[in-house]
Every structure is written in C-alpha cells, then in structure tokens.
Image: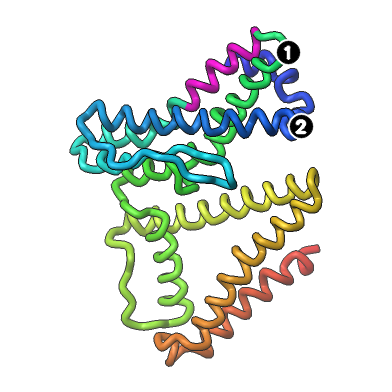
Amino acid sequence: VVLAVIHWHELTSDIVTQALSAQNLLILAAVYPAIKLVHELGHASATKVWGGQLHEFGVMLLVLIPVPYVDASASAAFPQKWKRLVVSGAGIMVELLAAAIAMIVWVNAEPGIVRAIAFNVMLIGGVSTLLFNGNPLLRYDAYYILSDLIEIPNLAQRSKNYLYYLVRRYAWSVRNLQNPAHSRGEKIWFVLYGIASTLYRVVICVGILLFIADKLFLLGFVLAVAAVVAWVLVPLGKFVRYLATSNELFRTRGRAILSTLLVFFGILFWPIVTF
C-alpha cells in the first residue's frame, strides 16, 4: 500500500489505455487463470489443514477462459466459526498477497514483460478482488464471510424475499404470508442488505457497460442489449404475468396493479419533475 501511494501517479497514468491494449489483454488472459488457481488453492489448503475433504477440484470455462474451481463446502461442518471464516477468506488473502508481491516487483522491474505481468497481477489480485470477490454485496467469498459472521444463512435470497414480503403484505394487503424474518435483527439485516446489494449491483453493471461502450462501442451496444433483456425485460415479463394471473392477488389485484403503476411512473417522471 505504501509503494502504491508513493508511485500512484505512475501507476495510474493512462491506466485504461494500458489495460486495454492488445498486448496487455493477452497477458491478462494468461495471468487470470493463474491467479484464480492460487486463489482456489488457498481455499483448498485451508480446508485440508483442518481435516476437511475436497470432493471436487477442476476447471470451468468463464467467457471461454479456463478458470479453476474447488469444492470447499466441507468446511461448513467445522464447529469453530473462525476456521470457516478463514476458509472463506483464504482466496482473498492469497490474491492480496500476490498483488502485494507484484507491487514490489513492478516498482523494481524495468519496463517489459515482467513488469506487465506484475501490473496485471495487481489489477486482478488487488482492484478486482476488492470490488468483486472481497465485497459482501456480491455473492462471492466476502458474502459468505458476512453471512457466517452474522449467522444468517442464505442472506441474499432471504433479503430479497423479505423485501418482496413487505411489498405484498403492506402495499398489496396479501393475506396469509409467511414472514422470512424470524427476529428483529434479521429484519434489519434483510432491509439493509437487500437495498444495498441491489444498488451496488446496478451501479457496477451500469458502470461496466458505460465503460465498455465508451472504449468499444459495438461490443458495448451488444452487451447493453443483452443486459436490458436479461435484467429488465425477462424479470418485467415474469412480474407482469404474476400481477395478471397470481391467485394470491385475487382479492387485491387492482390495488397491486395501481400501486405498481404509480411507483413506475413516479420513477420515470421524477427526473423530469425535479429538473
């Protein structure tokens, strides 16, 4: 971190052009599987050292790039919470260690292939780890650490279900619903996590799409269309079908449709009104 601060200007100068150059993209494609391999070995080692069994260790294709993976679910049986947390966080720790070593190499190496590799290790093990794998608002390692730490399993899905329950129960007056929250503490966590994780995913996805569209317009347009279909049109179609056909809205279908339309038009016209 000290070295990064000292060399911040040199490190970030024209970083976008440098990261997206053809040569760097090839290096990035080669470095990424290697970093993820040591990441998974971190999970595996932490699981094995306390007697856990690894039932599966292999490679999957992620956007045509081979990415290693390991089944470390045996750690869920560890009675000590701190051991489970170490297993969940081992991949993050390994990546941050690799990024720290790469920072030292980058500072001392001459311009060339070694320095380029070190730059990409920092990019993957540092920046992407903190934004994605190390962020509990996305369902990666840090999410499972948070879920285990606060002792609320399946936090993301239950948060989503609880927010949906609040809408159906209090906005649409649907009766005989089962509350997903079992305590006041869970209610608070579900509301905070459900809202924060949704907003973070939207910001990250929109930011990535805008970045790609700015640098690679055609690819950005294709990804934007795919994102609109997957994130907007498909869920919207399911939601409209639910409003129109769900038996639980038999008594309050009109109220549900009216309140939904009011919220939709409120979101749509709010920027115009405020402007």
Per the image, the residue denoted by label 2 is 21
Q: Pointer 1: residues within 10 angstroms few (<14), some, or many (20+)?
A: few
Work out how far the residue at label 2 is from the one at label 1, CA to CA, in angstroms: 15 Å
Count the marks. 2
Where is mark 1, residue-wise? 111
If you read the primary sequence from the N terminus, does the residue marked by circle 2 or circle 1 appear first?
A: 2
Task: Using the image, determine if residue 84 lies above or below residue 155.
Answer: above
Front in this rendered view, residue 54 or 18: 54
Can residue 139 be found in the magenta stretch?
no
Question: Please, is residue 235 above or below residue 82 in the view?
Answer: below
Tell me whether circle 2 and circle 1 mark residues in contact (CB < 8 Å).
Answer: no
Q: Position of residue 128 (x, y in %)?
A: 57, 35
Query: Tag 2: residue type?
Result: Ser
At 47% from the left and 57% from the top, the residue drawn is 194
Q: Position of residue 42 (x, y in %)?
A: 38, 28
Q: Which quadrant of the view contains residue 185?
A: bottom left
User: SS class of the residue under badge 2?
Assistant: loop
Q: Is residue 105 left or right of residue 9?
A: left
